[in-house]
Amino acid sequence: MENQKFMEEGIDGKRILLLLGRKIWVPIAAAFVGALLGGGVYLLAHLLFASQREYESVSKIYLNFDCSPQDFNELTYNGYTWNDLMATDPILDYTMENLPPEVERETVIQATKAEILSDIRLLTITITTDDPEITGKIMEATQASLIHLGETDELFESIEVYSTSQPQQIVWDNRTVRAAVSGMVVALVAAVIIMVFYYVMDDSVYTANDVEKRYGIPAIGILPEGKDGFAEGLYKEFLVNYRYLSRGMKATALISPDSRDSAEKAGDSVRKWLERDEGNGKKTGDNGRPEALCNPLVYGMPEEDTEIYQKLRKTDGAIIAVRFGAGNGKRMERLLGNLKKQDCSILGAVIVEPDENFLKMYYIGKGYGARKPAFQYGEGKKDKQ
């Protein structure tokens, strides 16, 4: 049931953005690490695990066909077949005759690439091996074989060598910066997605809205640790809500799903502000006389002392002190479930140990504490009177 409420409560976009802002260093660090990994892996792959250096020679061969240009499309020797033709016996056999015995036939086939880039009469031959001397010898033998083909094949008037480049080492295309940027972008996007998913699924309590929508109990207020105007505004909001919800009660209790320390801190804060409120002579009763507020009793964790439920039943209501952003949603569910099973009256919940900067931004700016608090329970009714 509680899980269903959690899934149905919707996404508080402002809360998600503020929580992401608190951890803005995470995607920045992820982007930095991603850039290092992307560039590092690229360099590692190309410097340590790269294959042997290769040398390349390129030659431009002119094919003088014995036909008119209108018949070029019907030629057997077209741009789609030259690479295969270079490995056939009529051409390859003559190439091998012009090479030393140590050069194998398969080496020549793997090293040779023939292609028509634009004009069908201009053939580009590329020879690539790991030895510049072998590259040059294969190129010379290939050129001789093609010239011989032009002299013996009736489809050609002649085949001529237009240009030839000396064997040169293939320069490594350094894309380290591009790899680093790619790694940075991937890591940044992944970090943001993971953080958004985490905070969407986070069942921690951050705001009063989390308490009321998720658990269906009143959020009495937030007890900050600061002493500025914002903190004072939150305390006043807590007091007016507590005053109204505990009217006519003789005993209330403070209990926490997190630790006894959280409950004790909440108890100390409440007692301090109750004493201050009484010392100021607040006229809060309907009859205009000072109205005394019951000082909540602090209890430990129920799982540490099962007799606490019996003590809680003797009070008029329990206040749950839930720690801000502590990943305590499931503990809160368990405590509420047990309190209901034990017939313990639940007065509401109060958020303790909050991040006040987060709350200032969430409640529309730092001037929130200077304005009159938006009291939630009973104030509207009293004003009408």
Image (spheres, rainbow, N blue to C red):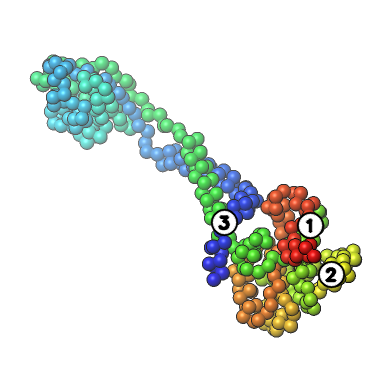
Of tags 2 and 3, which is closer to the observer? 2
Question: Which of pointers 1 and 2 lies earlier in the amino acid sequence?
Answer: 1
For residue 173, side relative to residue 298 (left or right): left
Tell me the CA gap for discs 1 and 2: 21 Å
Query: In the figure, residue 80 lies in which quadrant?
Result: top left
Which label number is shown at residue 285?
A: 2
Q: Is residue 357 visible?
A: no
Q: Amino acid at mark 2?
A: Gly
Which label number is shown at residue 11?
A: 3
Residue under the image location 74 percent in, 83 percent down: 314
Q: Nearer the viewer, residue 314 or 136?
A: 314
Secondary structure under the numbered disc 1 in the rendered image? helix
Q: Nearer the viewer, residue 359 or 299?
A: 359
Of tags 1 and 2, which is closer to the observer? 2
Residue under the image location 16 percent in, 17 percent down: 69
The local crowd at label 1, few if under 14, some if 14 to 19, many if 20 or more residues have their Cα within 10 Å, is many
For residue 151, side relative to residue 4 (left or right): left
